[in-house]
Amino acid sequence: MDVYPIRKALSIAQELGLDLVEISPNAKPPVVKAMDYKKFLYEQKKREKAMKAKASKVVVKEIRFGPNTDDHDYEFKKRNAEKFLKDGAKLKAFVFFKGRSIVFKDKGEILLLRLAQDLEEYGKVEQMPKLEGKRMTMFLSPTKKAK
């Protein structure tokens, strides 16, 4: 390999007060670029930070019910869920079964399906009610127009 072009490029970069950065070392001849390397790193970090700031953060709000939740409590929690979905957050609604209340699995599922039906204009069901241990969980995500 001929070293002359690299020496010439290095001398040009030194004259300009810049660094010689190897772009593609496997190419024949190797591709190099004269640049201010610290400035390049600074701008790259700045770009990454801007991209990170633009990335949307998914917020998940939780609402907890019991299998025998009263109508007033249900309405109160439904209003909160509505507000969460309007704000663009995902909603995790779950029914927690304590002790022997696990025999009311059907009541818990009916409660969650009722919530999904009441909130269908604000959010759509992402995951139908599913029993995991002592909790029955359902996920709702906001609709486009709710945002």
Image (tube, rainbow, N blue to C red):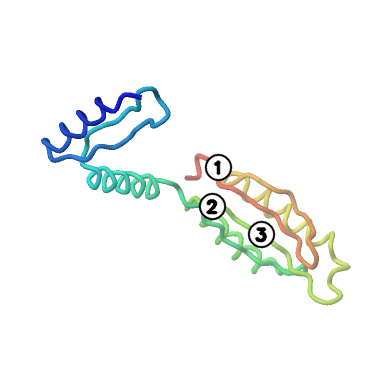
Crowding near the residue tagged with mark 3, few <14, some 14–19, many ≥20 C-alpha atoms within 10 Å: many
In which quadrant is the N terminus drawn?
top left
**The disc label shown at residue 143, or none:** 1
Please tell me which of labels 3 and 2 falls first in the chain: 2
Q: Are marks 1 and 2 in contact (CB under 8 Å)?
A: yes
Marks 1 and 2, the one that precedes in the sequence: 2
- The amino acid pointed to by label 3 is Ala
x then y, percent, for residue 106: 84, 59
Q: Which residue is mark 2?
A: 85
| Residue drawn 22% across the image and 31% down it | 7
Q: CA distance from mark 3 to mark 2?
A: 12 Å
Number of residues whose C-alpha sits closer than 10 Å to that of mark 2, classed few (under 14), some (14–19) or many (20 or more): many
Identity of the residue furthest to the bottom in this view: 99
What residue does disc 3 label?
A: 93
The kind of secondary structure element at disc 2 is helix
Where residue 82 sits, quadrant-wise, is: bottom right
Tell which of 115 and 131 is nearer to you: 131
Residue ID at (12%, 36%) = 16
The one of 144 and 121 positioned closer to us in this rendering: 144
Residue 11 placement, left or right of 126: left
Label disc, if present, on residue 114 of the rendered structure: none
Quarter of the image where one finds residue 69: bottom right
Amino acid type at image mark 2:
Leu
**Residue 46 image offset from top left, x and y in percent:** 29, 48
**Mark 1 vs 3, N-terminal side:** 3
